[in-house]
Image (cartoon, grey):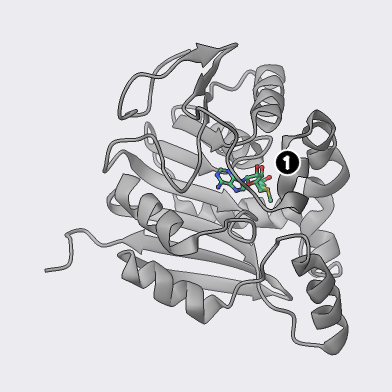
Amino acid sequence: MAGISRLDKSYPEKDGIILTLKERSRVPLAQSSNFLPLTAKLYEPLWRHRSLGILTRGSFSTQRELELMLEWLEAKANETILDAACSAGLYARTLANYEPTLNLTATDFSLPFLQQAKSYAEQKNVQLELIQADVRELPFEGDSFDAIVCGGSLNEFTDLPTTLAEFARVLKPGGRMWQMYLKEAEGWAGKSLQGLIKLSGIRFIDPKELEQLAQEANLTLQKAQHRGVVVMSLFKKARADHA
Ligand SMILES: C[S@@+](CC[C@H](N)C(=O)[O-])C[C@H]1O[C@@H](n2cnc3c(N)ncnc32)[C@H](O)[C@@H]1O
């Protein structure tokens, strides 16, 4: 496997996956399912490919989400892109299919998800660098990536300011960041359902608060599209550090 990202030091590798974590990251109890092989196996076929259709009650689809991600990201030949908290690597594979010269790194803290990402990538003959890592402390040198894509994971991250600062650190100046996430529902039925889901450690994000936190991390909102509770947005790291 080609070493394409700029790791901050050398780490052990097992079965084609680079391991940067000494122990399993701490997560809310209900998020422990991310570490089960069965979750990793069923995630894409049972949920991910239908998720946007279900979440928007048919007004959008996962296929259109992927098309919008490609359109807004404008990935160019040979760029270096990080699929952060990749689960089974849907974004990374989509990018590889779109532009085969991209250098793609996919990270997650769940080993079963990374093993599933490896299996799908091999089936599709896609080259991915797979790294077990926590977004709160990414194992990369600064200014490593032209772009970051992150789908549905902001809702699971437990420390958004630290994570956004890490994303900004590893992005090159002018680098782009695509985020798809779920915001707070407006109607009482949606709010009640989200209230139950919150018990599992998932949070629903206020887009204005995210914009503010991202700005504090030197990531400026470029555009956003809201489809029901689903928000897709593109941020850019400033070309030079703030004075
Ligand atoms: C909603 S899924 C991501 C879906 C995926 N991006 C896609 O588009 O199919 C959330 C993922 O975030 C990962 N995750 C949550 N917190 C994390 C953290 N602190 N560091 C790394 N991965 C994390 C979970 O293991 C899970 O695979």
Count of numbered circles on the image? 1
Q: Residue 78 versus residue 34: which sits nearer the camera?
A: 34
Instruction: Note whether 4 is above or below 143 in the view shown.
Output: above
Q: Where is residue 175 drawn, in percent x and y?
A: 33, 52
Question: Which amino acid type is shown beneath numbered disc 1?
Answer: Asn
Q: Residue at x 85, y 62 (%)?
A: 54
Instruction: Note whether 75 is above or below 190 in the view shown.
Output: above
Categorize mark 1 by other alpha carbons within 10 Å: few (<14), some (14-19), many (20+): some
> Callout 1: helix, strand or loop?
helix
Instruction: Note whether 52 is above or below 4 in the view shown.
Output: below
Question: Badge 1 is on which residue?
Answer: 34
Instruction: Answer with the quarter of the image where residue 15 lies.
Output: top right
Instruction: Answer with the quarter of the image where residue 235 lies.
Output: bottom left
Q: Residue 186 versus residue 50: which sits nearer the camera?
A: 186
Q: Where is residue 92 drawn, in percent x and y?
A: 57, 36
Q: Residue at x 43, y 44 (%)?
A: 75
In which quadrant is the C terminus drawn? bottom left
Q: Is mark 1 within 8 Å of ligand 1?
A: yes
Q: Is residue 106 left or right of residue 193?
A: left
Q: Is residue 121 left or right of residue 234?
A: right
Q: Where is residue 210 drawn, in percent x and y?
A: 49, 72
Q: Residue at x 88, y 83 (%)?
A: 189
Q: Residue at x 45, y 55 (%)?
A: 163
Q: Where is residue 19 drawn, in percent x and y?
A: 51, 23
